[in-house]
Structure formats: structure tokens, C-alpha cells
């Protein structure tokens, strides 16, 4: 491997460029007309323009991306997260061109991308799952399955992610409409309208485990990330280690997750996501077959460069040894959004000055003068703090958010600071209902 095409944009594109430089590899970035001012265009070895601004015309245009890979002489493609990162057809097309796909094999993208199949596979290998259903075919079948599971239930898309298309159903009278709603959103967002049922859990903990595997029957975990601080089922803040849980139980679940991935022959990086109930029962949620947005949290507490490791594993390298857990790390996602309506905020970044502080890392794909458009995810930056105590990590994030100068768009900085200072959060009493509770009391 000598040259990597990065089929993505924003913070993850810039992050992969940095990893390539550290590994001595050339990097090729692509950019839409809306991203023409991005800082990583000059940081990469080469940059190629994509005509248009919409995702369909640019970062989802498989034919154009593959043509650029051929023209640039790239022998590997890193898909980042989102867009084509877990697209089976794209991964297979990359391999058919004789190019390395930096991620798990397409069979894993397919297997884990179908949440019904993934649940069945994990249960077959002894990993706990909460009550759920097979693929739904009609309201009558769904009603019978929901009665067996017990209300409330959640209708969920079999594909996709990010909380899209998930609908909670309290009783049978709402089930048919919920199925239709979830199916329509899934079909539009993920090109797969399949839905299934899962038991709805009230205010669980969302705990995920970072997995590294070599496809040769070896796998290890890099501990857990606490991801319960969410809004509309989308993560706002992540940390490691998870506060307020039985550390021995969490370690045992992490080890089981790695053991199952080893048995399966999984390869490259992956994140096994789970839910912990209030009485600490555990169930499989999904397996993400890509680098996560929040990978920097794990990097901070382990010293392991996950992106460089991902590239090395795709190139046939052996697994690294498991590092010890070092301190506490926490990440917040700074979004360009109206704090009242929660709608994306667009405009020119008249001022954009990330803080430069000890113990704080900022990942962003923007720089001052760029224009934020409505075409892509509204995340401006990730702030990742590390300290020898959880309190130091929190303090560094608070100072970093206050010092981050942004003029031209509105942000969610005030909400993030209110979370970081809330008594429940400070005491480690987090769950998926925390943000809603904070917003209702504002």
C-alpha cells in the first residue's frame, strides 16, 4: 500500500490524511464544490474536485470515486464513516478493481448491516440479546410478534443507523402506522425499507466496545465507550471508561465481545454496541463495521492510533498488543445548529478559532472563511479531553468550549456546557434520557 484515496469529507477526511502522513503513505482527497475551502485539501498529497454539492452527486457517487482512484494511482480506499463506509456494493466494487478496501470484508458489511441477521448471529454465538423479532412482513405478523415481546416496543430499520426511522409503540393501535412511518424513512434514507421489532427499554445505558481483529481468528478489545448522552438517538458526548457501572461486568462483556469476533473471523476494526438496563442486564444493539466518530476517545485512553491501525490491518499487519487503560477521556460534538429549533445553522464562518490547550484535541474539517451548507452533517468539530481524573477531562472540555470562537453560525455549545455541569452527569448518573431531562428544565 502506498497511496490512499479518502472517499469522505470533513473531520474524518482530515484525520485519515494525518494518519497517512504518519505512516509514510500518500493521501488523495476529494471535495465537492461546497467543500472547496476545506483545510485538508492542502494537507493531502493530492486533491480532486467532485462536480456538484449534493451527497448523491459527490461523496455517494461510486463511479466517480472509483475513476479518481484509478486516475490517481491509489491502491487503497478509506471510506471514513457515513456515506459509503458500510456500503457492500461499494466495497465489492473497490476490491474488484484490485484496490484495498480499508475496512472489514464486504461479507461483514452485509452481515452486520442487516440488524436482524446480526442479532441472530450474535445470539447464536452466545452474546446476550434483548427480545426482538424477525423481519416484519405485515401488520398482523407484527402484532403477534409484539404481543410476544411485550409493549412498549420499538420499530427499527434493519439497515442504516444514527437513530433514523426508529419509532416507539405503546400499544397495538399504533403499530401499523409506526411500521409504515419507519419503513418509509428507512427506504428513503437507507434504500432498504425493512423493519423489525425490539423491546423498548426506558432510559438504558448505551455502552460500546472497540474491537480490533485480523480476520485470522484473532481479536481484542480496547475497552468501552459510554455513549448514553444522546439527543434524538444521536450521540452528543462519549467517554471512557464508563462511569457508575460495575467495572468487572463491563470488562467481562468487552472480553466476550472480542471472543465472539475472534470466533467469527471478523477483520479490521468494528464497534459492538450494547444496551445496559438500569439493573445492568446487557443486550446486543448492533455492530458498526467502520471507524466511529468517537474513536478519538479510545485513542486518548489507550495511546493507540485507531486510524493508522485500521490502515495497517487492511494491509495485512498483525494485531497490536492490548494497551493498558490510561486515565479518562471525553468527547463532545460541536454542531452548527440553532439552539432553540435544533435545526442546522448555515452561513459563512466569519470567525472559527479552535482552542489550543494542553489535554485537549480538536478534530475539524473546517477553517475560518468556509461556508456551511445544508447538504451535509452539521458537525463543526469534535473536542476530546484527557486527564488523570474524570473531573479534569470535564474541566478541560468546559474551558475548551468557552474558548472556541465561532461567529457566523449558531452552535450547540451552550447545551454541551449545561450537560457537562449538570449534577447527574457530574455524578456519573447518565442514561439515554439525560439530555431530554436537561432541556425540559432549561
Image (tube, rainbow, N blue to C red):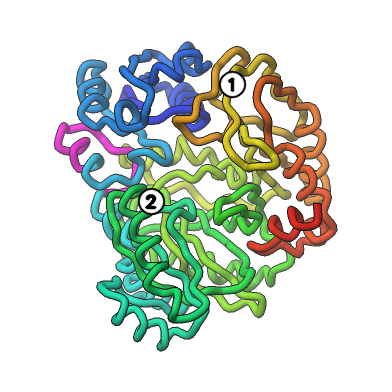
Which image quarter holds the N terminus? top left
- SS label for mark 2: loop
* Farthest left residue in view: 96
Task: Please say whether residue 292 is one of the residues in the magenta stretch.
Answer: no
Comparing labels 2 and 1, the label whose residue is closer to the camera: 1
Task: Give the residue displayed 54% in from the left and 59% down from the top.
Answer: 208
Identify which residue, 401 or 303, lies in the foreground: 401
Disc 2 designates what residue? Answer: 289
Q: Quadrant of residue 83?
A: top left
- SS label for mark 1: strand
Task: Give the residue displayed 27% in from the left and 74% down from the top.
Answer: 138
Which mark, by number, is residue 347?
1
Q: Position of residue 21 (x, y in %)?
A: 46, 21
Q: Quadrant of residue 177?
A: bottom left
Residue 17 appears in the figure = yes
Q: Is residue 300 above or below residue 204?
A: above
Task: Give the residue displayed 78% in from the left and 51% down from the top.
Answer: 390
Identify which residue, 109 or 56, lies in the foreground: 56
Q: Is residue 203 above or below residue 111?
A: below
Mark 2 or mark 1: which comes first in sequence?
2
Q: Tell me where the magenta segment starts and ends, as one range.
A: 92-105
Q: Is residue 376 above or below residue 37?
A: below
What's the CA distance linking mark 2 and mark 1?
Answer: 33 Å
Amino acid at each position: 500500500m502506498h497511496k490512499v484515496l479518502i472517499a469522505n469529507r470533513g473531520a474524518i477526511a482530515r484525520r485519515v490524511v494525518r494518519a497517512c502522513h504518519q505512516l509514510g503513505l500518500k493521501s488523495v482527497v476529494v471535495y465537492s464544490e461546497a467543500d472547496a475551502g476545506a483545510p485538508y485539501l492542502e494537507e493531502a498529497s493530492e486533491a480532486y474536485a467532485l462536480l456538484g454539492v449534493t451527497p448523491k452527486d459527490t461523496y455517494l457517487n461510486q463511479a466517480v470515486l472509483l475513476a479518481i482512484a484509478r486516475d490517481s494511482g491509489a491502491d487503497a480506499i478509506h471510506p471514513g464513516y457515513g456515506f459509503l463506509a458500510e456500503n457492500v456494493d461499494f466495497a465489492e466494487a473497490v476490491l474488484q478493481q484490485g484496490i484495498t478496501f480499508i475496512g472489514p470484508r464486504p461479507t461483514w458489511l452485509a452481515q452486520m448491516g442487516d440488524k436482524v441477521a446480526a442479532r441472530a448471529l450474535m445470539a447464536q454465538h452466545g452474546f446476550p440479546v434483548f427480545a426482538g423479532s424477525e423481519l416484519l412482513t405485515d401488520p398482523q405478523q407484527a402484532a403477534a410478534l409484539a404481543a410476544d415481546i411485550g409493549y412498549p416496543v420499538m420499530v427499527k430499520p434493519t439497515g442504516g443507523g444514527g437513530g433514523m426511522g426508529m419509532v416507539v409503540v405503546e400499544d397495538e393501535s399504533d403499530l401499523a402506522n409506526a411500521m409504515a412511518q419507519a419503513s418509509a424513512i428507512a427506504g428513503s434514507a437507507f434504500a432498504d425499507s425493512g423493519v423489525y421489532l425490539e423491546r423498548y427499554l426506558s432510559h438504558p445505558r448505551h455502552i460500546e466496545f472497540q474491537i480490533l481483529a485480523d480476520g485470522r481468528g484473532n481479536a481484542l478489545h480496547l475497552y468501552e465507550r459510554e455513549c448514553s448522552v444522546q439527543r434524538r438517538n444521536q450521540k452528543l458526548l462519549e467517554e471512557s471508561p464508563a462511569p457508575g457501572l460495575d467495572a468487572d461486568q463491563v470488562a467481562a462483556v468487552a472480553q466476550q465481545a472480542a471472543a465472539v469476533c475472534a470466533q467469527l473471523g471478523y477483520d479490521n476494526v468494528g464497534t459492538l454496541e450494547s444496551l445496559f438496563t438500569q439493573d445492568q442486564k446487557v443486550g446486543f444493539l448492533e455492530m458498526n463495521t467502520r471507524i466511529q466518530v468517537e474513536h478519538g476517545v479510545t485513542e486518548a485512553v489507550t495511546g493507540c492510533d485507531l486510524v493508522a491501525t485500521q490502515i495497517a490491518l487492511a494491509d495485512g499487519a498483525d494485531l497490536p498488543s492490548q494497551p493498558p487503560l490510561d486515565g479518562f477521556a471525553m468527547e463532545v460534538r460541536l454542531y452548527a445548529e440553532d439552539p432553540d429549533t435544533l435545526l442546522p445553522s448555515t452561513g459563512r464562518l466569519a470567525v472559527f478559532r479552535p482552542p489550543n490547550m494542553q489535554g485537549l484535541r480538536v478534530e475539524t474539517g473546517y477553517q475560518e472563511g468556509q461556508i456551511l451548507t445544508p447538504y451535509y452533517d452539521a458537525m463543526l468539530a469534535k473536542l476530546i479531553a484527557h486527564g488523570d481524573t474524570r473531573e479534569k477531562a470535564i474541566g478541560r472540555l468546559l474551558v475548551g468550549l468557552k474558548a472556541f470562537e465561532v461567529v457566523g453560525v449558531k452552535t450547540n455549545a451552550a447545551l454541551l456546557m449545561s450537560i457537562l455541569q449538570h449534577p447527574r452527569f457530574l455524578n456519573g448518573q447518565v442514561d439515554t434520557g439525560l439530555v431530554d431531562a436537561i432541556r425540559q428544565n432549561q
